[in-house]
Image (cartoon, rainbow, N blue to C red):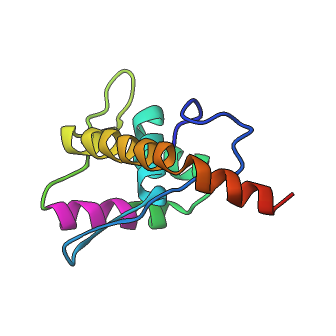
Amino acid sequence: MNDSTYPATTAVMVRPRVYIGESIALGPGKIDLLRAIGKTRSLSAAARSLGIPYKRAWLLVDSLNHGFGQPVVQAVAGGKGGGGTILTVLGAELVSRYDALERRINEASVAELKALRQLAI
């Protein structure tokens, strides 16, 4: 979830996990990783920014690549500016669609989320 999606005062929100068939599980962790890759243009920098080991990040991306049957990120050749990793069209679409789903679920759940927040007071 990007920082501008919800105000910092939001204490309760729904972050869905979506299962597509038997081979794809898509949730906040993978989406946050894809979002960080899009921002940093680097798998290792994205992993560091989320506090997860590089190998774990690579395995998460690999599971998406295999599940969807096509890459969600692609390596960019080095050069003067160096190499890196960028989201493919599929990777960017996954982030966009997940964000829209999350936003709609939270908008539809305002009363329930408010009630849950009040239980914590």
Q: Is residue 50 magenta?
A: no
Residue 95 found in image quarter: top left
Q: What span is colored magenta in the figure? A: 59-68
Q: Residue furthest left?
A: 69
Q: Is residue 55 above or below residue 41?
A: below
Q: Residue furthest top?
A: 80
The count of marks equals: 0
Residue drawn at point x = 48 percent, y = 35 percent: 40
Q: Residue furthest bottom?
A: 22
Left or right of 14 on screen, residue 21: left
**Residue 83 percent coordinates (x, y):** 35, 34
Residue placed most toward the observer, 5 or 2: 5
Q: Residue furthest right?
A: 121
**Residue 64 percent coordinates (x, y):** 27, 62
Left or right of 112 on screen, residue 56: left
**Residue 85 percent coordinates (x, y):** 34, 40
Residue drawn at point x = 46 percent, y = 47 percent: 108
Residue placed most toward the observer, 77 or 117: 117
